[in-house]
Amino acid sequence: MTISAFREARAIEVGESVALSLAETIWPTRCAICDRPGEVLCAECAESLPFIDQWLACPRCGAPWGLRQCTECNPFSLGEVGSIRLPYEGCVCAVAFDDRSARIPRAHKDAGERRLAHTMAYYIACAIPPEWLPAVVAYIPATPAARLRRGFDHGRSLAGRVAELLDLPCERLLEPPAALDQRGLARVSRFQNLSQALRARRKTLLAPAQRVILVEVTKQLGGTTEKVEPEKKSSSFKVRVSIDDLNIRKGPGTNYAKTGKYTGKGVFTITEVKSGKGSDAGWGKLKSGVGWISLDYAKRI
Ligand SMILES: [Zn+2]
Ligand SMILES: [Zn+2]
């Protein structure tokens, strides 16, 4: 290669890379997960998503392995957030939330990659059981501030696509939430945040027995629509303890000191439930005020 030919080839190379980076700046199509240029979600990443097997999922709250016994919507985990039951018929989740799948709604919502609404809507539409149809598709509207910041209403864009795919109407049935940034909040705070945030629109008119499908991207299964009609009943309930030596602690967790007392076998009233160290089902506060017990060793009655 002569020097001039080399220079020419180099110039083309440089020119191409400049053109590419320019195109990338103007129209940056990159995979939301692996960042590889080309598609909004590359085939490899799409295939490796943690899709939920609907045959094994909880039909009530959509949790991935909850068909037989669900850890998300059992009486204890609901009691923890002050609810007695889920106020909806069912919930399905298309893809589990993990570090990789979370990048898709983030790129859609925060980075404005609106083409991802098609992809997400497709997965959601496929997961919706046929017996839910016909229905009206609803969404949680973005707050005016969020809409202004992002330039579009991400919830509406997603629900609209789902409705289109299933040939259903999409309606604005809810008011924009007062504060619905759930990121960085602990489980209980998320529930509380939501319960205060969602309200049905005053002008909403639905035919009796009209089914509504609420489309939402959420990290927390089993809780999203609970907030539309929060249960106002008292959260106190009775449990049966069948072991002699269940420790009573001064606070909700094994990091709190033992009181030195045991409940003994019997039925006890729990007035408050909190999550804490050392118990999967949470910690229950005894009505007598002596302390807290691990609900792993108590059966709700
Ligand atoms: Zn990728
Ligand atoms: Zn469940």
Image (spheres, rainbow, N blue to C red):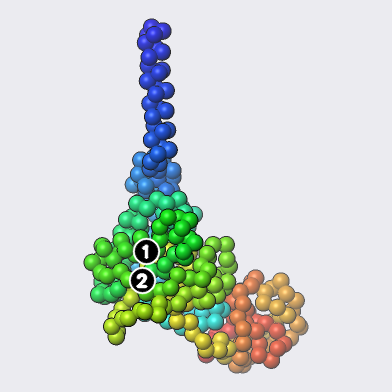
Closer-to-camera residue (115/66): 115
Q: Which picture quadrant has residue 176?
A: bottom left
- For residue 108, what is the image quadrant? bottom left
Q: Provide residue 280's location: percent of width, then percent of height.
A: 57, 73
Cα separation, mark 1 vs mark 2, equals: 8 Å
Q: Residues within 10 Å of mark 1 (few under 14, many from 20)?
A: many
- In the shown orientation, is residue 84 left or right of residue 5? right
Taking depth in this image into account, of 50 and 94 the one nearest to the observer is: 94
Amino acid beneath label 2: Arg
Instruction: Between residue 287 and residue 191, name the one nearer to us.
Output: 191
> Who's the residue at 40% across and 77% down the image?
201
Q: Which amino acid is tagged 1?
A: Arg
- Secondary structure of the residue carrying tag 1 is helix
Left or right of 232, for residue 161: left
Image disc number at residue 156: 1
Where residue 257 sits: x, y (%)? 75, 76
- Per the image, label 2 sits on a secondary structure element best described as loop
In the image, residue 16 sits, relative to residue 33, either above or below, namely above
Q: Residues within 10 Å of mark 2 (few under 14, many from 20)?
A: some
Instruction: Say above or below: 176 vs 22.
Output: below
Report the residue at 55% width, 89% height from top.
234
Rendered location of residue 173, percent (x, y): 37, 74
Give the image location of residue 154, x and y in percent: 40, 60
